[in-house]
Amino acid sequence: MALRPYKMRFADLNRLRKILVIVVESGGGMLVDRLRLRYILSLRYRLGGLLNLKRKPANEGLVRIEGAKPIFTPSALRSLLERLGPTFIKLGQILSMRADLVGAELSNELSKLQSNAGPFPYETAREILKEELGQYPEELFKSFEKEPIAAASLAQVHRAFLKEGDEVAVKIQRPGIQKVIEQDIHILFFLAGLAERFLPEVRTYQPTRIVREFADWTLRELDFRAEGHNADRFRYIFKENTEINIPKIYWTYTATRVLTAGFSHGAKVTDLERIEAFGVDRKRLASIGVDAFFRQFFIAGFFHADPHPGNFFAMPDGGLCLHDFGMVGYLDESSRRELLSC
């Protein structure tokens, strides 16, 4: 996919207009004006946005960039990103890990981002399995649950059993999501270019560079084979550690839009009630997690780059299970030495 910063394609204009309408409805008419984009909106929103600005409450608690006028409260920005859809939710989730860039309050609020996407129909999932693996689920598996156990903006997960008896989680990519994300990334490049041109206070943050890194990560994440290879590498890194569990990847049942991994009977690390029911020592669990990340950063130079609570499970035996390896990072030896010397 060729990404060209600053160039707005005709095919993207309708989506851009929808984005701007949501921004204006959320109280961001001032931002649309500063980016010189109000001409793209209908007359209703050109006028309505100005009225909306006048109705906005005082500036208390609004998100600020140093030297800039306030635009959104942290909770309003989170709601805006959720309304804008999966690409923007993913961007917000990544920014939530950069408290050094967005501040602690906004980082904490963005960590609450949730996808409003419901599950897509079983028949659609069934056809994707056929396209990717060559057979329907009833032909591939001993059993396959039609209702997903989890659904997110990029994919949903079904529980299944292989004919050999292994219990697995089958992750199936949401139909059409790649096209949606690629279009949004084109638009983000365009908006980043305008921000650097018209918002001098954000230039130091290099918006285009942020979008480029985000695009690289997100587009890689859409190829589930890459995630499978990352998981295999983590399994190798922790092969001697019995307290860290990395689900096995079943390559016969994995393709670009389908990932099949061993099923984990654990609890999210934020589900304290279930963890207590397991009888797990939470301090020991935290120690295991810290040791795991030290090993990733300082020994392996290969680390999990999407460390939100949904990707870490406490296991009934007291161990820690890591999930979702679509986003990973690398540290070369010199960078590791530099970190150790700090």
Image (cartoon, rainbow, N blue to C red):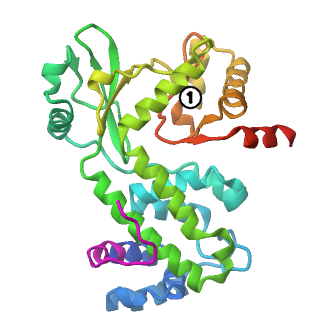
Give, as a three-letter code, the residue at label 1: Asp
Magenta stretch: give its range: 1-16
User: As drawn, is 159 to the left or to the right of 239?
Assistant: left
Query: How many other residues sit within 10 Å of disc 1, few (<14), some (14-19) or many (≥20)?
Result: some
- Regarding residue 173, the answer to whether it shows in the image is yes
User: As drawn, is 15 to the left or to the right of 98?
Assistant: left
Q: Residue at x 29, y 58 (%)?
A: 179
Q: Quadrant of the N terminus?
A: bottom left
Q: Nearer the viewer, residue 103 or 147?
A: 103
User: As drawn, is 334 to the left or to the right of 279?
Assistant: right
With respect to residue 57, does 150 lie above or below? above
| Residue furthest right in the image | 341
Say if the magenta span includes residue 58. Answer: no
With respect to residue 204, does 214 lie above or below? above
Q: Nearer the viewer, residue 114 or 17?
A: 17
Q: Quadrant of the C terminus?
A: top right
* Quarter residue 2 falls in: bottom left
* Quarter residue 41 falls in: bottom left
With respect to residue 174, does 103 lie above or below? below
Q: Nearer the viewer, residue 314 or 250?
A: 250
Which structural element holds mark 1?
loop
Which residue is denoted by mark 1 in the rendering?
271
